[in-house]
Amino acid sequence: MRFVLPVSWHRSFYPRRGGAPLAVEPSGDAMPPLGDAARAAAELAAGVTDAAEVRRVLAPVRTALAGAPERAYAEAADALRQVRTGSWAHRLAAAFLAPDLAGPDFAEVPERHPLAPLLLASASTVEQAQGVLARLAPTQAEQLREPELLHTLAEGIGDGVLDLYARYWTGRSVEYTLAGVPDYLAAMIEALPAIGTGRAFETLLGLAGQRGVPAAIMAAADRFPDLVVPLLRANASRPRVAELLSRHLARHTGTAVVATGAVPRLPQWVEPATLPPIRVAAAPVVQRLMRGEIPPEAGDLARFGWELCCRWEEAGAPPAGRWALEAQALVGDDETAAGLAEAVRRWAGEGAGQRVAAGIDVLRRLGGDAALRQLHDLATTAKSRAVRARAEAGLAGVAAGLGLTADALADRLVPRFGLAPGATVVLGDGPHRITAGFDDQLRPWVTDEHGTRRRDRPGSPFAAIRQGVRKVTAEQVHRLELAMTAGRRWSAAEFRVLLEHPLLFPLARRLVWITGPPGAPGVAVRVAEDRTLAGVADERADLAAGDVLGVAHPADLDVPAWMAVFADYGILQPFPQLHRPVYRLEPGESAAARLRPVAVVRLLALERHGWRRAAVEGARVLGMERDLPGGDVVAVGLDPGIALGPRPDRQPEQRLCDIRIRTPEGRARPLAELDAASVSQLLADLAPGQETSL
């Protein structure tokens, strides 16, 4: 059996040693004594009777063990063997942390033991998992519905999840359960695409007509093409399978192939005679064009493909014709990307979720700066939270493939509008020739062929550039302010991207920067006119290859000294940095003492500034959270909670309660340990009367 861990499962999955590769493996150099950590975790868990809560407590330690160096793991395993000599609770907690220790437990675990469900996450055969299931009470077996167990069992027992979950839901055959239990079908559609076995994929093929299954088949085809393509060909006579094979081959080879070898009947909405022409310079045209031997005239193929897509939409977007949309990833250009992004926004308003998801995926696969800029625009400005989240995920995937962070990719995607490094551009010829550009404040200016300043004419070539720069400047000012409040750091190489950009450089010049990670002592610097760095006394500062720096928060600065420097140079800041209020907690004071009830409208406005909804139960949001420097998360509870239906301005004020800091490992952290900048921003966001400029 093969298994490929989907990216979306990384936070709902219990890894095991020797299993699917971890997204981030712990470093052997920085690892704590795992033996002590594992022993303490098992001892702590043994005193809890809720198996789901025990899994939550032990999950970070299990992840650390799965990626630990051999020596560290061996020491931890020895410690856990000693723990297993205690009660059954100790034994089961240790087996969850190190599944290779669980061998005898599957046959010996007492029936209905409170922690018996832990063994499901350690099973490596369907017989082991079914043996555990037979010993569980009905209420305990309900834990199989949790995504974490489903995902972990998909890796551990492969397509055996078909049998295990059929036994749980009906006690009858897989076929009977697939036909009669929608929840079982939904669980299998999610799990099977990650499992590289013929049975898993043939089960999906047998359900190709069911809602959601075609997308699962395409996901499996992307992960296991050597297994899936032959099975698709062998089953091409089944409903929709031939279409899925064509889509898969078109996506990965650039050529649409009909599985049966027959010429397909074109939909009525195509009307080939009225499509834009594709001009080429040689014949036979079609075969050589499809093989890439002769390029079409610039733009022809893109216009042809986009017209097909528009006609498909006008015909009601029939599912069988979605190839017209997916073909844009192969033939599209910059104009296609702009049109497709507009269509995604329109489809989101119409509730066409599948079309929205496909359109965003096409933008991601189309690639190129224009398509990725449109994807970034969707991720930051789309009205729908679901569209923003999907676009963010697409950008994150592209960034990871390039070895960049999402923020670093966003820096590289800021358009230049044809401007030279000094933010100037020459337009026109002869007596109509003008030189235009932007000053240090990014205000536009125009000179004629004699160098005389004049007003720009409406509708001139520079008017479109001026409008685009105004929009981009507002976006980048907002991003830089968010970077300050979130503690973002640039490497030396990433910072050079800002210095070499005609629009980002003037913004970077008007801010104070600071070296080092958030909360650590650093050196405050500014960007000088010659794109070098200078300190508060105008001394030159240099960045070494391994240094990082970020937009300085005033809590970390000698504000009066820097105000004097900026006043001397006449520098106006793009947002309040040096004039930003700084809030601090007095010794022994709690953040809760500063908090007062807050209007729902203000709380929801924080979503644009790094906060997100959390703890959604039913139709009510019971908390909000945001990321902190270093990977920590701050979460705050809301009482009575934000109802998802009524208008925000008609809901009662929310009482802020239970402020918690959570580390990436799930450990609680006191607010007093936060750096001064994070505390100041937290109070500014949440305490009435302490608004930020965001």
Image: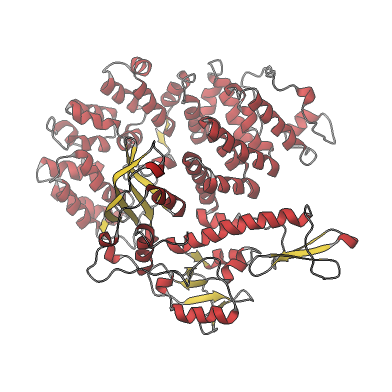
Q: Is residue 59 left or right of residue 391?
A: left
**Depth check: 556 or 197 in front?**
556
| Picture residue at 42% right of the left edge, 68% below the top | 517
| Picture residue at 14% right of the left edge, 34% below the top | 109
Q: Is residue 192 left or right of residue 428?
A: left
- Residue 442 at x, y percent in the picture: 65, 65
Above or below 111: residue 444: below
**Depth check: 341 or 83 in front?**
341
**Depth check: 432 or 180 in front?**
432
In this view of the protein, can residue 400 be seen by the observer?
yes
Q: Quadrant of residue 360?
A: top right
Above or below 35: residue 102: above
- Residue 370 at x, y percent in the picture: 65, 48
- Farthest front residue in view: 650
- Residue 652 at x, y percent in the picture: 33, 45
The colour mode here is secondary structure
| Picture residue at 59% right of the left edge, 66% below the top | 507
**Depth check: 222 or 597 in front?**
597
- Badge count: 0
Q: Quadrant of residue 448?
A: bottom right
Q: Quadrant of the N terminus?
A: top left
Q: Is residue 225 left or right of residue 274?
A: left
- Residue 198 at x, y percent in the picture: 44, 25
In this view of the protein, can residue 65 be seen by the observer?
no
